[in-house]
Image: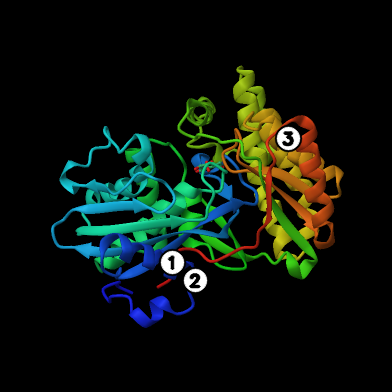
């Protein structure tokens, strides 16, 4: 679909759903209707954490929370960016002046993501021109739910469809990741952008981050009498700080030391022998996490395929222990959320995303929602932590044109 039709006035005012609100915001701001509205979701990763920069496996799914971009082409080549959520005014970008060494900063820092996408599209030689963009999102920022990827993917989809550029979803994800790596300066893997671009409703996405092979695995908690809670600890994480890059360097160093292309190439059965060859106790722990985590993804996928959803719980909790003790990317709030959920009857729980804050997830029986939510709120209060935000999540659709 190429987004060259102006949004029909009647369609825009009917219903008044979120896409219409985004379109209305665009019209009020720029004085004419957008040509379309494109949306991309945040994600939760069920299992497979810190594996994507080790050529490993991940199993994310898309959240119903999404970022919408209303957009229209401009003839003068300029790109104007505006956020309904962040008071930075309209940020004007001149494509010829885009420089990864000088991304928008300060209050306009959010604009580095769409500007980076524009930069990545141009760098790839794609014929994108000027555009006006108005962005609105209900993906909480800094909650480990990939608000950045949602913004990147929605922008990439909007700009490419506006200009009739046909890209596959994995290509879109790769360009969005390129924007984050090379323009924003965060050395992330490809999981978040792939989940946002490629996930499908009702499914978890099994992603092989080496081959980029994808499998859509039915994941229907409600049908199994289960619910997946997302606990946003409200502890802000910042992947741009050095800890993420340090984990990545440690993994790549360990792979080289073991004579492997990536830690993905270390079979689970050979883990102990490989660990015995490493001197650095930190590398031992990092490698043990990555290899056991890949194995957990394999086992969770098998259980989901067999319809044995409840039994994934202990693997989630094992994954959390590994991230806490071996990978050292958890924090007291995440640990408390996991321990409390499990003590209150969850089948399993773990932190999700990059860590150092952000969100945890808990797999619970449907009728335990109130008790688990209350237990977590009480425990956070007793510990003097900021009240967490607890929501239930079910796999939603990946990026799409919504108006
Ligand atoms: C962040 C990164 C992802 C991935 C996760 C950890 O979300 O953006 O690429 O590495 O952390 O699994």
Q: Quadrant of the C terminus?
A: bottom left
Mark toward the start of the polypeptide (1 vs 3): 1
Q: Residues at badges 1 and 3 in contact (C-beta under 8 Å)? A: no
In the rendered image, which residue does mark 3 sit on? 335
Along the line of sight, the residue nearer the viewer: 268 or 27:
27
Q: Can you give x and y, in whole percent of width and height, for residue 6 in the image?
A: 28, 75
Q: Which of marks 2 and 3 is in front?
A: 2
The residue under the point 80% across, 33% down is 382
Residue 321, visible in the rendered structure: yes
Mark toward the start of the polypeptide (2 vs 3): 2
Q: In which quarter of the image is the N terminus?
A: bottom left
- Under circle 2, the secondary element is loop
Classify mark 1 as within 8 Å of ligand 1 or not, answering yes or no: no
- Under circle 3, the secondary element is helix
The reply, left or right, for residue 395 in relation to residue 185 is right
Q: Cα distance, mark 1 to mark 3?
A: 38 Å
Quick one: which residue is furthest to the top in this view?
279
Q: In which quarter of the image is residue 224?
A: bottom right
In the rendered image, which residue does mark 2 sit on? 17
The reply, left or right, for residue 190 in relation to residue 258 is left
Report how many numbered discs are placed on residues in the image. 3
Q: Can you give x and y, in whole percent of width and height, for residue 175 in the image?
A: 35, 51
Query: Crowding at label 2, few (<14), some or many (≥20) Cα neighbours within 10 Å?
Result: few
Along the line of sight, the residue nearer the viewer: 172 or 305:
172
The reply, left or right, for residue 266 in relation to residue 89 is right
Q: Cα distance, mark 2 to mark 3?
A: 37 Å
The residue under the point 63% across, 38% down is 291
Q: Residues at badges 1 and 2 in contact (C-beta under 8 Å)? A: yes
- Under circle 1, the secondary element is helix
Scheme of colours in the image: rainbow
Q: Which mark is residue 21?
A: 1
């Amino acid at each position: 679909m190429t987004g060259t039709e102006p949004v029909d006035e009647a369609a825009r005012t009917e219903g008044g759903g979120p896409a219409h609100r985004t379109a209305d915001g665009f019209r009020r701001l720029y004085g004419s209707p957008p040509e379309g509205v494109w949306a991309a979701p945040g994600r939760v990763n069920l299992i497979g954490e810190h594996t994507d920069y080790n050529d490993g496996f991940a199993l994310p799914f898309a959240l119903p929370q999404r970022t919408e971009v209303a957009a229209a082409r401009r003839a003068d080549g300029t790109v104007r960016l505006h956020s309904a959520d962040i008071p930075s005014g309209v940020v004007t970008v001149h494509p010829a002046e885009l420089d990864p060494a000088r991304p928008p900063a300060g209050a306009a820092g959010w604009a580095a993501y769409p500007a980076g996408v524009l930069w990545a599209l141009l760098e790839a030689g794609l014929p994108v021109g000027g555009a006006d963009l108005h962005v609105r999102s209900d993906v909480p920022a800094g909650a480990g739910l990939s608000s950045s990827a949602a913004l990147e993917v929605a922008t990439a989809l909007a700009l490419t469809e506006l200009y009739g550029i046909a890209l596959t979803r994995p290509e879109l994800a790769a360009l969005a990741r390129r924007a984050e790596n090379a323009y924003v300066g965060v050395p992330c893997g490809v999981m978040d952008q792939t989940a946002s671009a490629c996930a499908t409703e009702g499914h978890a996405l099994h992603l092989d981050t080496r081959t980029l092979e994808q499998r859509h695995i039915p994941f229907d908690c409600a049908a199994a009498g289960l619910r997946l809670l997302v606990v946003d600890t409200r502890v802000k994480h910042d992947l741009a700080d050095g800890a993420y890059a340090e984990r990545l360097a440690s993994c790549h160093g360990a792979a080289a030391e073991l004579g492997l292309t990536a830690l993905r190439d270390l079979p689970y059965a050979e883990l102990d022998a490989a660990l015995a060859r490493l001197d650095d106790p930190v590398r031992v722990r990092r490698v043990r996490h990555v290899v056991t985590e890949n194995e957990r993804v394999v086992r969770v996928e098998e259980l989901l395929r067999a319809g044995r959803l409840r039994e994934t719980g202990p693997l989630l909790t094992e994954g959390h222990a590994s991230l806490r003790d071996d990978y050292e990317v958890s924090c007291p709030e995440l640990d408390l959320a996991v321990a409390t959920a499990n003590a209150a009857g969850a089948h399993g729980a773990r932190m999700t995303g990059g860590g150092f804050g952000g969100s945890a997830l808990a797999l619970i029986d449907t009728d335990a929602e109130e008790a688990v939510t209350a237990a977590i709120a009480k425990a956070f209060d007793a510990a003097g932590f900021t009240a967490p935000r607890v929501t239930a999540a079910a796999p939603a659709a990946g990026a799409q044109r919504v108006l």
